[in-house]
Amino acid sequence: MAGTKWSGDDSDVSQSARQVTAVDLISDDDRSVAADSWSIKSDYGSTLDDDQRHADASEALSVVSFRAASDYNSDKEEPDSEPVSSMLGFQSFWDSTYAHELANFREHGHSGEVWFGADVMASVASWTKSICLETFQRQLVDNVGGGVNCLPPGQYEKDLLTWSVLDVGTGNGLLLQELAKLGFSDLTGSDYSEGAIELARSLADRDGFSYIKFLVDDVLDTKLDRKFQLVTDKGTLDAIGLHPDGPLKRMMYWDSISKLVAPGGLLVITVCNSTKDELIQEVVSFSQSRAVGSQGESECPIDATSHHPVFEYLDHIRTYPTFMFGGAVGSRVATVAFQGK
């Protein structure tokens, strides 16, 4: 799930972050935190049965200083004073993680950790195909007039499954395998960790998906020069937010992602450290900042309130397990779909 590369000394985080106990890792916040929603003890399960892997992840999580609310939460009265930081925001953590998982694969055949759990991954894949089909059908109606009724039975689904797909921060690439099982064929996974890409390729070859393409690429400094009709992210934005410069890195993320999603294409993000509403507000904030930035390059004043949105919210998964806290109902994982403009 890694997908970004940072500069600086990784030790800065361990020196500045607050040490927390195992009890601290169980959060009541409805946005949850990395420790109790995307760790090896996820509510949604894990495929890894290696005790040392558990210990390594727990140790990394122990240096996190968690926030009580997001910078983008519209219902709070005052902004958070300090950003969250964690070892999970650094490439060295992910290089070490995937070196360990690659060794486990070679020795035991283990696929490695499924972030958020296998059930969430399957839900993301099936729901993504559904939202793609709905979007494709709507585009046919808008562009052709007669819509799907003008096509032979099943043709629109065959056309959809040729969509180009990019999974940023792909990790072990298992989400792409799930999409392949649903019929998608033009699949690419990128990750800044060479170990992750080597593991993903090995798993794809073993499982009969050798046609999936994998490449080493940093989403914040991408060398990809093409746009994709579907871009997926399962946990990468979370990792970006756990870097000490998380707020700035997240803005860089949106700028990069906006160049990877084709006009009319879809972006499907799965996170545990933001709610649906927070993600939507983050996209709005990015669009506004881009409008303000372009104002300096234009002789005509630009109204930031009437900015052209980079992405439009489409829908979100509504079937995840929920809990109630403070009179509000929430989920520890959110999957949101946006459409590129």
Image (tube, grey):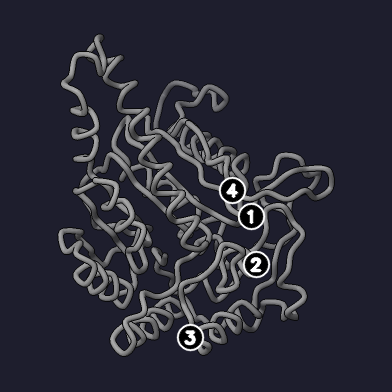
| Viewer-nearest residue: 261 or 203 | 203
CB-based contact (under 8 Å), mark 4 and mark 2: no
Could you tell me which quadrant the N terminus lies in? bottom left
Percent x, y of residue 108: 34, 87
Which mark sits nearer the N-terminus, 4 or 1? 4
Query: How far apart, in angstroms, are the residues tagged by discs 1 and 3?
Result: 24 Å
**Residue 15 vertical position relative to residue 135 in the rendered view, above or below:** below
CB-based contact (under 8 Å), mark 1 and mark 2: yes
Q: Which residue is mark 1?
A: 332
Q: Nearer the viewer, mark 3 or mark 2?
A: 3
Which mark sits nearer the N-terminus, 3 or 2? 2
Which mark sits nearer the N-terminus, 1 or 2? 2
Mark 1 crowdedness (10 Å alpha carbons): few <14, some 14-19, many ≥20: many
Q: Which residue is mark 4?
A: 320
Q: Which residue is mark 3?
A: 50
**Amino acid type assigned to the residue bearing label 4 in the image:** Tyr
Q: Which mark is residue 47?
A: none
**Amino acid type assigned to the residue bearing label 1 in the image:** Arg
Q: For this view, does 84 lie left or right of residue 199?
A: right
Which mark sits nearer the N-terminus, 4 or 2? 2
Which mark sits nearer the N-terminus, 1 or 3? 3
